[in-house]
Amino acid sequence: GYVALFLLAYIFQFLYGLPKDINITLLITLSVIVAYVLGVLFHEFSNILESKLFTRHSEKILLGDSSLLSTEEKSKAILDAKNNFGLVFDQIDSKYSSYIYSIFRSSLKKNSTNPEYIESEIFNVHYGMCRNLFGIFLAFALCVFILGLTHWFSLKLLLVDSILSLIAWIIHRRAERFSKYHVVGVFRAYLQK
């Protein structure tokens, strides 16, 4: 939320300049409230963005084109899903892959002292943070790009936009990596039970 608030303040300052009289107590109080609300909004935005633009690792981990697990691990996971949870399917697709991941993760929550599971949950926390930051930097990169175009190709804004876009791209790559480590960790922790 504070990252979004800082970027919002930058855009506001560019458009309107700095306010002359600022009540510091009011500013701090409002910044906490606004940062929280922005954090919640960007969390939802990043969820929507992910579901519309990307295939989640949980959806592709058991598919033939996935290199996240070995062939033996995939076969054991599919067999466990059929035998232990009564799932019936002829061919694995992204829906079943994601569903098996969810079942395995829920099953592991009962045994939360498993070190592999705890490590995978740490990757999940990092993934969520990176996904949210990606949404924030992408949204502000688009806003700054539009501002740069409407202000006669302001070089300062286009430079800021390039930096925001680069940060968004780097953070998205990190989110992808953390998501992969999380999903692989859940499957491996379950299969080691």
Image (cartoon, rainbow, N blue to C red):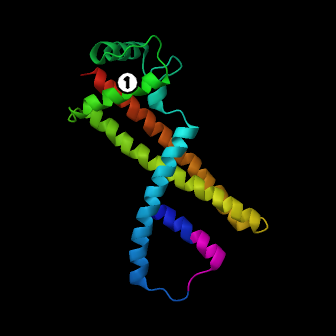
- 104 shown above or below 152: above
Q: Quadrant of the N terminus?
A: bottom left
Question: SS for tag 1?
Answer: helix
Q: Nearer the viewer, residue 131 or 52?
A: 52
- 145 shown above or below 117: below
Q: Main secondary structure of the magenta part?
A: helix
Q: Which residue lies at the image location 45% right of the left edge and 64% below the top edge?
A: 2
- 69 shown above or below 22: above
Report the amino acid beneath label 1.
Ile
In the rendered image, is residue 23 in sight?
yes
Which residues make up the magenta segment?
10-19
| Residue 24 picture location, percent across and down | 42, 83
| Residue 65 picture location, percent across and down | 54, 19
- Side of 49 relative to 189 (left or right): right
Q: Which residue lies at the image location 38% right of the left edge and 76% below the top edge?
A: 29
Residue 12: say if magenta.
Answer: yes
| Tag 1 residue | 100
